[in-house]
Amino acid sequence: MPMNGTGKASTRAGARRRTVPLVLGMVSALLALLFAAPGVASADDTPTIGSAWMGSTVLEHEGGSRVYSKPAVSPLATVEGVDVSSHQGNVAWSTLWNAGNRFAYVKATEGTTYKNPYFTQQYNGSYNVGMIRGAYHFALPNSSSGASQANYFASNGGGWSADGRTLPGVLDIEYNPYGATCYGLSQAGMVNWIRDFLNTYHSRTGRYAVIYTTTNWWQTCTGNYSGFASNHPLWVARYASSVGALPAGWGFHTFWQYTSTGPTVGDHNVFNGAIDRLRALATNS
């Protein structure tokens, strides 16, 4: 039946009433996406295996300065260097070399499933500009044995060669970026896992791996175990003006990661010695 003018007006008004809430709902949803509070994770924000890097958990758990400044160090600790991962992509190594950096550590692997897709450019590129370089492994002690991860690392970039410019591999053992701080292991279980990794790596390469960690994590997750200090150099992370207290057993640190906001690549480090001692670390097994 044809509508009269009043009926048509009523129909149009009803359509407008239905349309307005729909449009407002769409606008609200869009604004929620645009102005979501930073740091509030959605399901899509969950980190994926392989996305961690050396020190990726330090600021969250321990804080520290977010403003880059070079620390005051011993006059003998003159060698500056960097560490990189896939997050840096193809690195401008000549820029870093010209800025005085003389060593680099490159993420090679994580767990037993991840390999850095930029490893070749980063590992060879640092070497080609004259740096002393090495590789590191981000440990996931809850995913597989220490031996399995050490073998995976040694077979995928973490090996060592006696060329005088290749540093021993690094075990990056820090807060779990994907879950429980200590990966669900007891302190004794964590010590056993680390020992399994270190012994296997030494068997594969003839070198004692460097241990990268923070003092707080080491105390919490290993019970401040001191048994690795006699053979394994310590790389400590602390974003402050001094290196601070060290884990038990180590009387000194070998490397110090002092910032995550340095020039060009973010993570900057200092070797606790002169360049000849760094060359010795690259040479002596």
Image (cartoon, rainbow, N blue to C red):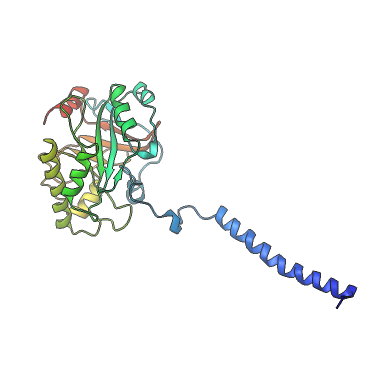
In the rendered view of the protein, which quadrant contains the C terminus? Answer: top left
Residue farthest along the front direction in this orientation: 1
- Of residue 256 and residue 285, the one placed in the foreground of this image is 285
Q: Where is residue 137 in the image (x, y as percent from the top left)?
A: 25, 42
- Of residue 8 and residue 197, the one placed in the foreground of this image is 8
Residue 191 lies left or right of residue 18; in this view the side is left
Residue farthest along the bottom direction in this orientation: 1
In which quarter of the view is residue 273 placed? Answer: top left
* Total tally of numbered discs in the picture: 0
Residue drawn at 43 percent across, 54 percent down: 45
Residue drawn at 40 percent across, 41 percent down: 66
- Of residue 192 and residue 251, the one placed in the foreground of this image is 192
Answer yes or no: is residue 270 visible: yes
Query: Is residue 257 placed above or below 274 in the rendered structure?
Result: below
Residue 229 lies left or right of residue 110; in this view the side is left
Residue 159 lies left or right of residue 116; in this view the side is left
In the rendered view of the protein, which quadrant contains the N terminus? Answer: bottom right
Q: Where is residue 179 in the image (x, y as percent from the top left)?
A: 31, 57
Q: Where is residue 90 in the image (x, y as percent from the top left)?
A: 39, 32
Query: Is residue 94 placed above or below 63 in the rendered structure?
Result: above
Q: Where is residue 257 in the image (x, y as percent from the top left)?
A: 29, 37
Answer yes or no: is residue 211 visible: no
Residue drawn at 76 percent across, 69 percent down: 15
Residue drawn at 35 percent across, 44 percent down: 64
In which quarter of the view is residue 161 placed? Answer: top left
